Image (tube, grey):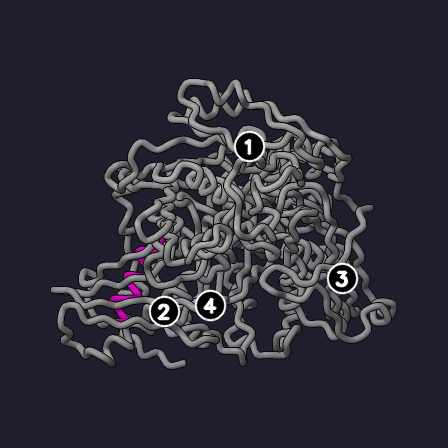
Amino acid sequence: MSDDLRIKEIGMERSRVEGALKVTGRAPYAMEHGAGHGVQEPLHAFLVGSTVSRGRVLAVHADEVRGSEDVVAVLDHTNAPRLADTDDEEYAVLQDDEVHFRGQVVALVLATTSEAAREGARRVRVEYAAEPGEHVFDEDSEGDEPEKLNAGLPPSGSTGEPDLALASATHVLDETYRTPYMHNNPMEPHATTALWDLGPDGAELRCFDSTQAAHSVRSTLARLFGIEAGRVHVEASHVGGGFGSKGLPHAHNVVAVLAARSQPGRWVRLAVTRQQMFALTGYRTATISRFRLGAGPDGVLGVISHDVVEQTSRCKEFAEQTVAPTRHVYAAPNRRTSTRLVRLDVAVPSWMRAPGEMPGSFAQEAAMDELADLVGLDPIELRRRNEPEADPETGKSFGDRRLLECFDRGAERFGWSERGPARSRLEGDWYVGLGTAASVYPAYTQPGNQARVLAEPGGYRVEIGAVDIGTGARTVLRQIAADALDVDLDAIDLRLGSSDLPIASVAGGSSGTSSWGWAIVAASRTFRAQHGTSPEPGDESVAGPPKKPVDEDYALHSFGAQFVEARVNRFTGEVRVPRMLGVFSVGRVVNPKLARSQLVGGMTMGLSTALFEESWRDPRFGHVVTDDLATYHVATHADVRDIEAAWLDESDHRANPMGLRGIGEIGITGAGAAVASAVTNATGVRQRSIPVTPDKALGWE
């Protein structure tokens, strides 16, 4: 794919164009749109969640609440508007009396103030016919193979004779690695402001939503409520983070519109509380990975076997693609991956930053680290000896696979040569160790995106329905547009964040900039071909990438190498990480300032998963008890010390005309394994699960 873009803005450091709006509090989020945006005298909604995990609602006692001042309505399954499509149990809210998990929405209070709605919800009393629920997921849980994994991947696969080859291997590793339940916690909780407008031409639905995909919300709500997609208008002008949890609509979207439909012509505001998010807006499932590696005397792998057990909700299947990294990173002629799903009476899992790749990379890299000790090799040397010539899964060329270069550059910069044997370095009361791990993430470009270019006096307006969730899309897409149209940055007026603009895919899968940027390049090229370099104001063109945008002759991935120094107190087991370094191969970097922010952010989230993040489910009732930021711990300023992100100078035009690959998720993959590796090197205690808490660090567990 030729590089025919004039590269002037791409590669330049530019500050966020919306930065001033955000730091001064003038950027409106989903709950903040007021009279200036047509939202006047909104009603406030508050959710009532089930207190049982399985059974049926017998009665909702709310007469006293309905008679309260400021309360407008109480909705439950007996009086809520009917949906046109109830096939998806997560979205079929208030449509019947069945309860699938604790925290499921069983009623809703509408009031003129948020305080009255919350108090009303507290006073609603629900009677249940409870049934025994299954809530426990562990090694003894029985599961079955799903039809497919997230991203459409097959759940299992094999080549060669793994069991036979394992029996004849010189070195055999057979261990189990675990990751816990984790919950997305973006700063802005999920929220929707909705209006069901009964105009002369029929119903129109308007939403201000905190989402990663305005068009996905539009299409889902149109199907559920049986109206044309063109009559649904979703705006997501500013979004306070998502980490995948806002990549798909959830039950709260449906409830907000049900409430608005029950009060035509009235705006309704609904914000999911922090506690409710732990039941209603998705999470990362826990995983149990059995890894079996067979290697010769030189450490060269003959066998890679990865069997995963994870859980989903009984009411809706979601299968994390935990085995995905194992299929692409290291060479071995005999290979097997498998996935089993355990179905429980619990909330529905969903996307969380690098779904599948994050827990899968932890298991894979922890296993490789352990094999290096078993064979007696440096961890980087073991990886060097098992570098594949082509993608082990498909046999296709990787194109630019520079993983070993990332390791070599990182090792020199980090001082890897100073790493000694386990438990060999004690400074005062602190054991000190170094660890490393590989990072990998697919280079996705989503099909179906379109962009519009319009000539205006003195410049161009570029429109696409993409959503900037805080990653800097407004800035980098403007830079891409400037180069695609061969004009200065000031000549570009970029519009995004609305389903009324040309269709755009989700801000997820590290695919946003590549997918939307390609659409902008395609629209710009079409515009120049149709209108030349001196267009008249009002001239416009709409276009998008090819239907199959990615070059299917290659297995395109980004790679990286993560390095960590860990210090473990020999008396308390406290773990501190004073240094992290990531060196990445991600194609061309559009904006170094924002790219560094994304990579460091991913590494910080990886540090957080390695040391703190763990959701605890009550085995009796099936709900998460660590349902706030006081009990669900995340890394804070004191935990995040010296984190550096660097990248190779490159451009990959197999991926798209801009030469870039995604950077949103590769920073988190491998980070947890690198931390665990460093702790193992510090203390001599092997770490096979995260988070690495003090008891695990010193082997007290």
Q: Nearer the viewer, mark 3 or mark 4?
A: 4
Name the spot of residue 292 as percent of width and height, x first. 78, 61
Q: Could you tell me if the residues under marks 3 and 1 are in contact, i.e. CB atoms within 8 Å?
A: no
Query: Does label 4 or label 1 sit earlier along the sequence?
Result: 1
Instruction: Tell me how far mark 4 sits from mark 2, CA to CA.
Output: 10 Å
Q: Nearer the viewer, mark 4 or mark 1?
A: 1
Report which residue position mark 2 lands on. 519
Assess disc 2: are there few (<14), some (14-19) or many (≥20) residues with their C-alpha within 10 Å of its C-alpha.
many
Query: Does label 4 or label 2 sit earlier along the sequence?
Result: 4
Instruction: Tell me how far mark 3 sits from mark 1, CA to CA.
Output: 59 Å
Assess disc 3: are there few (<14), some (14-19) or many (≥20) residues with their C-alpha within 10 Å of its C-alpha.
many
Assess disc 4: are there few (<14), some (14-19) or many (≥20) residues with their C-alpha within 10 Å of its C-alpha.
many
Q: Determine the secondary structure under disc 4.
A: loop
Q: Could you tell me if the residues under marks 4 and 2 are in contact, i.e. CB atoms within 8 Å?
A: no
Figure check: 30 above or below 213? above
- Magenta region's main secondary structure? helix
Name the spot of residue 470 as percent of width and height, x first. 38, 48
Mark 3: which amino acid? Val
Q: Nearer the viewer, mark 2 or mark 3?
A: 2
Mark 1: which amino acid? Ala
Instruction: Tell me how far mark 4 sits from mark 1, CA to CA.
Output: 40 Å
Q: Determine the secondary structure under disc 2.
A: helix
Which residues make up the magenta segment? 472-484
Number of callouts:
4
Q: Determine the secondary structure under disc 3.
A: helix
Looking at the image, which residue is at 41% across and 58% down?
229
Name the spot of residue 527 as percent of width and height, x first. 25, 75
Q: Determine the secondary structure under disc 1.
A: strand
Report which residue position mark 1 lands on. 107
Q: Could you tell me if the residues under marks 2 and 3 are in contact, i.e. CB atoms within 8 Å?
A: no
| The N terminus: image quadrant | bottom left
Looking at the image, which residue is at 60% across and 43% down?
182
